[in-house]
Amino acid sequence: MLYSAEYGWGTAFEQLVAGIVAGFDPARDAGWIAEVNGERAGCVFCMRQDDETAKLRLLLVEPSARGLGIGRRLVEECVRHARDEGCRRVTLWTRDCLTSARRIYRAAGFELESAEKGSENGVELVEEMWSLDLA
């Protein structure tokens, strides 16, 4: 509901998120939930794409916790985990309107690989693929 309220994205996005979560394999993947004063404040998943590549998925920081460095810390933990698991690369997919997340990715060393126009619930946007080499 957060992305619907903030960006006008609809049920197709909710279905996409549900599909990502349904694909979580605890034998291969990891996830973190950040808390502030006992309340959920954010999350991220590190999911294996293949033997050498991890995908950073579903980075989210609640509006009440933004500006506290939680997003940066979640991304750092995901990258650390991928490196510890022997991955040589981390990829992620995002959208251009998620400016704070994009700033975090760039600061963590991710580089923009590709961008293409898209839409979500009739809202025009640019979909981006980013990557970070760990080798």
Image (cartoon, grey):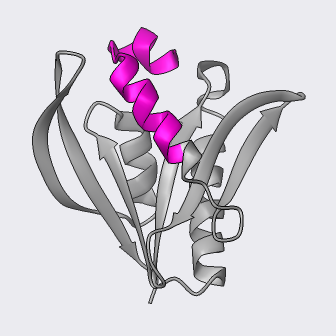
Q: Position of residue 118 (x, y in %)?
A: 14, 34
Quarter occupied by residue 43: top right
User: Magenta span covers which residues?
Assistant: 1-20
Q: Residue at x 59, y 80 (%)?
A: 83
Predominant secondary structure, magenta span: helix
| Residue occupying image coordinates x 36% and y 45% | 102
Query: Residue at 60% across / 28% down in the picture?
Result: 66
Was residue 33 drawn as part of the magenta stretch in this picture?
A: no
Q: Split into 4 quadrants, where in the image is the C terminus?
A: bottom left
Can the viewer see residue 31 in this picture?
yes
Q: As rendered, which of 31 and 18 lies closer to the eye?
A: 18
Q: Position of residue 9 (x, y in %)?
A: 34, 18
Q: Is residue 129 left or right of residue 103?
A: left
- Could you say which is closer to the camera, residue 72 or residue 22? 22
Q: Is residue 55 left or right of residue 61?
A: left
Would residue 35 appear left or right of 28 to someone viewing this image? right
Can residue 69 be seen here? The reply is no
Residue 71 placed where, x, y %? 58, 44
- The mark total stands at 0
Comparing 63 with 89, the one in front is: 89
